[in-house]
Image: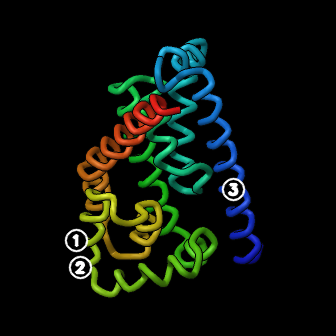
């Protein structure tokens, strides 16, 4: 499969994911989820074990291939499972997905990265790889603060000499702050917005 074809396919999947996310958000508004989270929790209560497992798998996949916007899936985790369990499931899925993205970048190198990342984004961040020590510092800052596309940087980190141990440590320590920020801003922003709709 050519790079152009694979990018088109990924773009179509991402567009479909965005469409489903928009539909799901509208559906949640109609159910009154942002006013009463037990309405949404009731939707997944029947799938006791498989609900959390399915959600974690979804988070892992969306880190590697952006099926749905990451912010939406983070907020969904908190809304569906509650603040504590939602955070835990988000964290597990994103950490595992980030490590998988790093290992894929390392194993398959630039050809895979070019399939998954547009030239514009690749060219924007490839300069970070020129200096290993500088990249590690910038990577750690970007993971801790939501200032850059983490998923892209995880793939690019696989192209560097960064050890899996260093990468994992940065992800494990840096991700909680970003996950909390995205999750709760989106959830409470949605709750606030629902009062005006």
Residue 92 in view of the camera:
no
In-front residue for pair 111/125: 125
Query: Real-space Cα distance between discs 3 and 1?
Result: 33 Å
If you read the primary sequence from the N terminus, does the residue marked by circle 3 or circle 1 appear first? Answer: 3
Nearer the observer, disc 3 or disc 1?
3
> Which element carries disc 1, helix, strand or loop?
helix
Q: What is the crowding at mark 3: few (fewer than 14 residues within 10 Å), some, or many (at least 20)?
A: some
**Dot 1 and dot 2 residues touching (CB under 8 Å):** yes
**Mark 2, secondary structure of its residue:** helix
Q: Position of residue 30 (x, y in %)?
A: 62, 25
The picture quadrant where one finds residue 85 is top left
Residue highlighted by disc 3: 15
Q: Is residue 185 visible?
A: yes
Asked if 89 appears above or below 147 in the picture, the reply is: above
Q: Nearer the viewer, mark 2 or mark 3?
A: 3
Asked if 69 appears above or below 150 in the picture, the reply is: above
Task: Give the numbered dot on residue 26.
Answer: none
Image position, residue 196 (x, y; %): 47, 33
Cα–Cα span, label 1 and label 2: 5 Å
- Residue 7: x and y in percent read 69, 70
Q: Is residue 46 left or right of residue 189?
A: right
Number of callouts: 3
Q: Which mark is residue 134?
A: 2
Q: Is residue 71 above or below residue 155?
A: above
Taking 71 as reference, is 167 left or right?
left
Quarter of the image where the N terminus is located: bottom right
Q: Residue at x 41, y 67 (%)?
A: 153
Q: CA distance from mark 2 to mark 3?
A: 34 Å
Q: Secondary structure at mark 3?
A: helix
Q: Earlier in the sequence, mark 2 or mark 3?
A: 3
Residue 170 horizontal/vertical position (percent): 26, 57
């Amino acid at each position: 499969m050519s790079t152009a074809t694979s990018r088109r396919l990924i773009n179509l999947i991402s567009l479909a994911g965005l469409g489903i996310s928009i539909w799901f958000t509208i559906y949640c508004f109609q159910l009154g989820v942002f006013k009463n989270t037990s309405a949404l929790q009731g939707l997944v209560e029947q799938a006791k074990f498989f609900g959390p497992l399915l959600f974690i798998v979804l988070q892992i996949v969306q880190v590697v291939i952006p099926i749905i916007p990451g912010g939406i899936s983070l907020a969904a985790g908190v809304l569906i499972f509650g603040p504590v369990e939602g955070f835990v499931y988000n964290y597990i899925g994103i950490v595992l997905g980030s490590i998988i993205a790093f290992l894929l970048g390392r194993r398959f190198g630039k050809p895979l990265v070019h399939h998954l990342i547009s030239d514009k984004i690749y060219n924007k961040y490839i300069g970070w790889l020129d200096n290993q020590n500088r990249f590690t510092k910038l990577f750690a800052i970007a993971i801790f603060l939501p200032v850059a596309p983490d998923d892209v940087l995880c793939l690019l980190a696989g192209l560097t000499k960064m050890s899996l141990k260093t990468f994992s440590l940065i992800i494990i320590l840096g991700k909680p702050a970003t996950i909390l920020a995205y999750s709760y801003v989106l959830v409470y922003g949605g709750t606030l917005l629902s009062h005006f709709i």
